[in-house]
Image: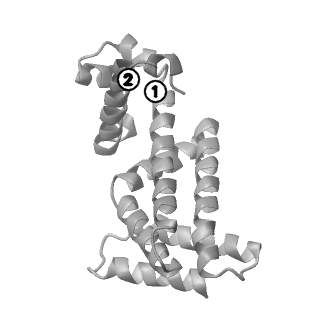
Amino acid sequence: MQNKDAVSTRKGASTRDRIVAAARHKLIEQGIEAFGLRELADSLGLTLSNVQYYFKTRENLLLFIFEQEAARDVAVINAHQHSFERAEDAFCAIIRDLVTRWRGDSGVLFSTLGTLALHNKTFRKLYRFTYTNFYAALEGPICQMNPELPKDEVKLRVRLVTALIDGSPLQTQVGKDFLQRLQAQAELIAKA
């Protein structure tokens, strides 16, 4: 994806991070159609070859952005899983933070990844990998709330909860108690 040798120095890591942050912002604000390496380089005051030193292609940069975003979701799950006394409280915090993320920039990025996955094998592979990791991370909190559940039932409930999270960005006409209601429904699925 990225040129690993390019980030072996602090300056290299800093430049790479600037490129990624600007690219992420551009992708969220302007969409995939406006996302090009040359325009990105110009906006950062870099040459195209400098950007390509870190990310050879537009696809490499996009994949890196999506991978980072997916890792952040798994980190949210892992951070909350053991930070509460009650498993139910940890689960509600996980759902709250994931829904908040998905109703913001993360939702835009994952929707873009989903669209790209429809037509590109490389993005489809990342999409599947991302969800596989997400499901695996979410199994732990559900098992903590309901340790007697058979493995197949845990997997089904993980997918149902994920469907709630995935669908939340599409719900634009919601009241202020939407997040609490969604958390309650997710908890019912996990515990039932």
Q: Does 155 sit left or right of 39 as displayed?
A: right
Task: Classify the position of the N terminus by image quarter.
Answer: top right
Q: Secondary structure at mark 2?
A: helix
Classify mark 1: residues with Cα within 10 Å, few (<14), some (14-19) or many (20+).
some
Residue at position x 40%, y 53% in the image: 106
The answer to whether mark 1 and mark 2 are in CB contact below 8 A is yes
**Kind of residue at badge 1:** Arg
Q: Which residue is mark 2?
A: 37
Label drawn at residue 58: 1
Residue at position x 45%, y 73% in the image: 84
Asked if residue 149 can be seen in this view, the reply is yes
Tell me: residue 136, above or below residue 32. Answer: below
Tell me: residue 122, above or below residue 187. Answer: above
**Kind of residue at badge 2:** Leu
Q: Secondary structure at mark 1?
A: helix
Tell me: residue 120, above or below residue 161. Answer: above
Residue at position x 51%, y 82% in the image: 187
Residue at position x 46%, y 30% in the image: 61
